[in-house]
Image: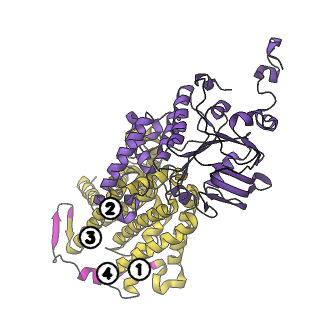
Amino acid sequence: MDWSAILSNTAQGLLSPATMAFALAALGLAMHFGFAGLLNFGIAGFMAIGAYGYAISILTFGFEWWQGILVSLVASVLFSLLLGIPTLRLRGDYLAIVTIAAAEILRLLFLTNAFVDVTGSADGLSGYHNSFRAANPFPEGDYGFGPWTYNNIEVWVLILGLITLAICAFLLLLLMKSPWGRVIKGIREDEDAVRALGKNVFAYKMQALIIGGVFGSLGGIVYALPSAVNPGVYVTSLTFFVWTALLLGGAATVFGPVLGAVIFWVLQAFLSNVLPQLVSSGILPFISSIQASTIRFILVGVGLMLLVIYRPQGILGDKKELTFVK
Amino acid sequence: MSSSSAKLPGKPAAKTIGLHVGTIRPGVPKVDPIITMDNVSRKFGGLVAVDVEHLEIPRGAITALIGPNGAGKTTLFNLLTGFDKPDTGTWNFAGKSLAGIPAFKVAQMGQVRTFQLTKALSLLTVLQNMKLGAKDQRGEKLMFSIFPFLWKAKEQEIEEKALELLKRFKLDTKKDDFAASLSGGQRKLLEMARALMTDPVLVMLDEPMAGVNPALTQSLLEHVLNLKKEGMTVLFVEHDMHMVRHIADWVVVMAEGRVVAEGPADEVMKNPAVIDAYLGSHQDTDLGTVTGRITLPPKGKK
């Protein structure tokens, strides 16, 4: 057992583009589900729009990196509108079905061979980094200490990711403390009651869907910034991983999703390192080390179930709320 | 009827009279109607839930809508408030046609409703529930909401108003509790108080007494009477005949989707069509006699 390697890899999970991407997507879901009560099971689709929108506008249209980000955001707003106009009049579970289908349609569109010139089909997209790296204000060299040592490109990605995450969390905090947030929470509890008080429920739900969608696509962009866009990433299980992070931290909180994403990735890093080592040192019998590293996904599923049953309000959720969960 | 009636004071509150024009009949015109409807009908499949030829609701009075289960009272409520759309007919509120107007706009026009199954917003605090009711809040607009200085003053104003109303409804000690922790009766009170936050012209209460314990009945009645005193019009659906008799200035009786009778409470109750359709022929008979499972001494027998 090489504990120093395990711990160092685990520590890296604390601060990685993937962690921040998950935190952003989970913030989007917190807006959708935790506050507005919209059961969105298509967050992977929003992330795919972010990632593909960014990569395609750079590779196909020759945009600058920041223009690529803007294109992604506009695309995610359009996707929210497209999704919301027909479906927001539906009740919760129907929205869930539609969003899961919409995300799959998107993924298959990105995967199909018909658009291989633009989307790269199954190979995905890569090599869109020039403009982004040219804008890097950090001179070449290593930054940080211990397990958190990064080169200048990684630091640039992390800093941008952190700034985005901070802005989004702050924005969500402001929104939910405002009267607007009160209406949104009211809609979560009972939209007919809110309608009877003279609020345009459909408009509020659409605004919530768009804001959460923008957060999700920002997550997709941060995910794509350091490396490549791979269609195998934006599958339904990504949606459920983000849901796990959200529920872990607390769905109706602002910092819960961030904390949940961090815990999720730290645990993932820890388990993917420790399980194969347990096998190779003979502690874990019957399975190969390749099988061992996928056990973590089973553990994620079990963890999600236990969480929903025993602590549905999450780590940061209000304890009093638990008393009243229907 | 219910045991709650035992607590009511003997003398009924002063009634508003002289609401109608001409002889009393179903669809009689009113001196000052706030709602008028013509040929409003709504079908669910083959079932005609509501088919009202003509009906006017008087302004500044308390009108009760009664009728047996399935008479279409709640459907009529839904049609009036924009929660459901009629298949035919025209209907207007304070002179404005309500055809095609969505529920939230109807509410903004000053017509607020409560629900048969109380809709307290469970995981909001009582105070938040109240604040949600207030109209014209700039902070509820997305663009303004992230700048607290734009809505702090209004918020303060709303809070004072909410606290005052809560005090009146004796919910002020609960203001920071989740609405879910309130009892059924308290939720009814909260829903009514929240509706008042919108400064309504017309308050529509769907079975305000259902599930309320006798101790609260008295104060709920007072609150309804107060609404009239403050110049609001009240329309309510109720099964409790004693409450209807006690506070309603005007009673509209529905059966099978149609208005079968209307008039001042005392007169309507004497109408044989109403007794037949709604009260049933056994209204003064002990339940035991009706079912035949208990033998009663012969003196009260009809």
- Chain under disc 4: A
Q: Earlier in the sequence, mark 1 or mark 4?
A: 4
Please report the bounds of the magenta region as a residue range: A123-148
Give whichever of A103, A321 is nearer the camera: A321
**A281 or A192, which lies in front?**
A192
Distance from the alpha carbon under mark 1 to that under mark 4:
15 Å
When asked about the image quadrant of residue B119, the answer is top right
What is the spatial separation of the Cα atoms under label 2 and label 3, in whole angstroms?
23 Å
Front position among marks 1 and 3: 3
Judge if badges 1 and 3 mark residues of a common chain: yes
- Chain letter for the residue marked with disc 2 in the picture: B
Label 2 is placed on what type of residue? Ile
Question: What is the secondary structure assignment of the residue under circle 2?
Answer: loop
N-terminal-most mark, 3 or 4? 4
As for residue A136 lying within the magenta part, the answer is yes
The chain displayed yellow equals A
A201 relative to A23 in the view: left or right: right
Q: Secondary structure at mark 3?
A: helix
Three-letter amino acid code of the residue under disc 3: Leu
Q: Which mark is residue B192?
A: none
Q: Disc 1 designates what residue?
A: A125
Q: Nearer the viewer, residue B120 or A140?
A: B120
Which residue lies under the disc numbered 4?
Answer: A65
Identified by mark 4, the residue type is Trp
Query: Three-letter amino acid code at disc 1?
Result: Leu
Question: In the figure, what tint was chain B given?
Answer: purple
Label 3 sits on residue:
A160
Q: Which residue is mark 2?
A: B146
